[in-house]
Image (spheres, grey):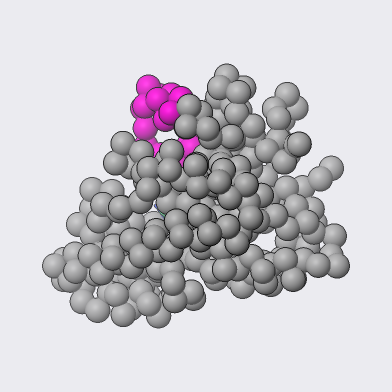
Amino acid sequence: MTIYDLHCHSTASDGTLTPTALVARAVQRGVHCLAITDHDDVSGLPEAHQAGAGTSLRIVNGVELSSLWERRTIHIVGLFFDADAPVLQEALAAVRAARRQRAEAISHALARAGIGGALEGARRFVTNEALISRLHFARFLVDQGHVSSKQKAFNRYLGQGKPAHVSPLWPGISESIAVLHAAGGMAVLAHPGRYPLTDTAMRRLLEEFRDSGGDAIEVFSSSHTPSQNERFVEYARFYGFKASLGSDFHDPEESYIDLGALPPLPSGLTPVWST
Ligand code: AMP
Ligand code: MN
Ligand code: MN
Ligand code: MN
């Protein structure tokens, strides 16, 4: 059996393991094929390829693009692209700039809610100067005792509809898909079960993702319940999407499941890695 894990994060975004440490952990856990999919940044990939050389692990290029659909953030995992493609590099730089602007606005909003110094505080957890994520703010809020868990940081401050939520300016999903295709890659809808959508809205998203050229959906994800896994297996079949899977691993303590820990894809689906 070949173990795939096509979604995880390194210190190039909001993960806590370096690409080298992530690759070593994947090798040690018996993973055969790994995609490191940092948020809006591909700077960890050369180190990952170097670390994977000469091991049993195949590394494929990955990224997780922040995108917008009906004013909601939707994550699109890109796989198998040319990481040097200028069209991709430019698109990622624009999203990272939007992240920096959003971080300033989040910090102002937290100040209004009585929590000062949040931008400087979050930056202490940043491991890639170019990339700041809400998870860095969550780690700061926990560290300073404002909340007892990262989940609470999102529920109280950072999540949609909360006092420090700032509407992000990401590209639309069709633009993200087009960029990934222009760079020679595939576009995978990340953890579809995580979006708080009615069934009707989910079908609309899946149809629009398909009609915009989207290639695959993550059917198995650590953010899915077992029944969501089943539901998205059915949706992949129904809409004709290829299937992907990923742990969304960020950190040995923080993450619900470890690298390569998801079950293999059920038969009858076309894996995203099939040619
Ligand atoms: P961002 O992409 O900067 O908006 O931040 C999103 C990241 O924050 C995700 O990739 C997760 O790492 C983390 N995250 C989002 N929502 C939650 C949540 N409810 N609980 C814990 N972590 C979360
Ligand atoms: Mn993350
Ligand atoms: Mn995500
Ligand atoms: Mn992720």
Image position of 107 (left or right of 253): left
- Residue 77 horizontal/vertical position (percent): 54, 47
What is the magenta range?
A: 191-208
- Residue 27 horizontal/vertical position (percent): 78, 62
Question: What residue is shown at x 40% (from left), y 80% (from top)?
Answer: 124
- Residue 222 horizontal/vertical position (percent): 56, 47
Q: Which quadrant of the structure image shows residue 57? A: bottom right
Question: What residue is shown at x 30% (from left), y 52% (from top)?
Answer: 169
Q: Quadrant of the C terminus?
A: top right
Instruction: Specify the farthest residue to the top.
Output: 238
Main secondary-structure element of the magenta-colored stretch: helix
232 relative to 116, above or below: above
Image position of 165 (left or right of 114): right
Instruction: Specify the farthest residue to the front.
Output: 86
Instruction: Specify the farthest residue to the left.
Output: 112
Q: Is residue 196 magenta?
A: yes
179 relative to 208, above or below: below
Q: Is residue 26 magenta?
A: no
Q: Quadrant of the N terminus?
A: top right
- Residue 244 horizontal/vertical position (percent): 64, 39
Asked if residue 232 shows in the view, the reply is yes
Q: Which quadrant of the structure image shows residue 157? A: bottom left
Asked if residue 37 shows in the view, the reply is no
Image position of 139 (left or right of 127): left
Q: Nearer the viewer, residue 37 or 224?
A: 37
Q: Which quadrant of the structure image shows residue 153? A: bottom left
Q: Nearer the viewer, residue 253 or 207?
A: 207
Question: What residue is shown at x 67% (from left), y 72% (from top)?
Answer: 47
79 relative to 104, above or below: above
Question: What residue is shown at x 39% (from left), y 58% (from top)?
Answer: 95
